[in-house]
Amino acid sequence: MLDKYGIAKRIAKEIKDGYYVNLGIGIPTLVANYIPDGMQVVLQSENGLLGMGPFPYEGEEDADYINAGKQTITTLPGSAIFDSAMSFGMIRARKIDLTILGAMEVSENGDIANWKIPGKMVKGMGGAMDLVASAENIIVAMQHVNKHGESKLLKACSLPLTGVRCVKKIVTEFGVFDILPEGGFKVVELHEGVSIDTVKQYTSGKLFY
């Protein structure tokens, strides 16, 4: 099974040359460290940056340069910094080729819940609402099960939704899964050491393999 770094590294293989990519908070931010050498990709951070680079080495952090998750980042030659209004203008105008988000739950229809657990304090939905409503291609980076060992790939989400029928692909510690147009999780690949029986055991939604 993969750890969070392995999930991020696998998702980086889905990025194509020339893409503009938005990285969400959590595992998705790690994807910046695994962009293949020689590939021209522009990473966008919703707080107002085009041209985000990998995380800085210890001791080289600059607190003025942060991503949407308030982590210190680096910039690349040609980077542009602007306000969040312009950033969300880009997102809503569908200028972003690929959005990579974390999630608490994903349904077999491609619904995503990633912003609220009822009864817990939250500041609000944040930029994910705009991203899932506007992006043409959404990949979710998430753990297959929650801390109680329960599936997060469900027939229907139990948590408040962020978006409906928007997720195209999921990468978990077990493998890579496409969301089928008619509904269901299609096994694209299993990571080394993971059996289909394990995936079946921990997937609550319809599974095709």
Image (cartoon, grey):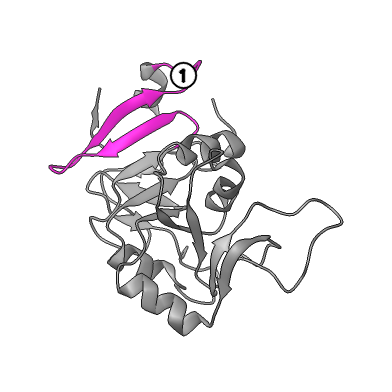
For the point 50% across and 15% down, which residue is it?
A: 193
The image shows residue 187, relative to residue 150, as above or below, that is: above
Report the side of 123 relative to 158 (left or right): right
**Residue at numbered disc 1:** 194
Taking the magenta stretch, the answer to whether it contains residue 192 is yes
Categorize mark 1 by other alpha carbons within 10 Å: few (<14), some (14-19), many (20+): some
Taking the magenta stretch, the answer to whether it contains residue 100 is no
Image quadrant assignment for residue 197:
top left
Image quadrant assignment for residue 85:
bottom left
In-front residue for pair 32/183 = 32
Q: Amino acid at mark 1?
A: Val
Q: At numbered mark 1, what does the secondary structure look like: helix, strand or loop? A: loop
For the point 42% across and 16% down, which residue is it?
A: 195
For the point 55% across and 46% down, which residue is it?
A: 31
In the rendered image, residue 14, in percent from the top left (x then y), is placed at: 40, 40
User: What's the magenta region?
Assistant: 172-195
Report the side of 163 relative to 86 (left or right): left
In-front residue for pair 80/13 = 80
In the rendered image, residue 114, in percent from the top left (x then y), is placed at: 43, 59
In the rendered image, residue 12, in percent from the top left (x then y), is placed at: 48, 40
Report the side of 142 relative to 206 (left or right): right
Residue that lies at the very extreme toward the left in this rendered image: 182
Query: Which quarter of the rendered picture does the N terminus lie within?
Result: top right
In the rendered image, residue 21, in percent from the top left (x then y), is placed at: 44, 56
Query: Which quarter of the rendered picture does the C terminus lie within?
Result: top left
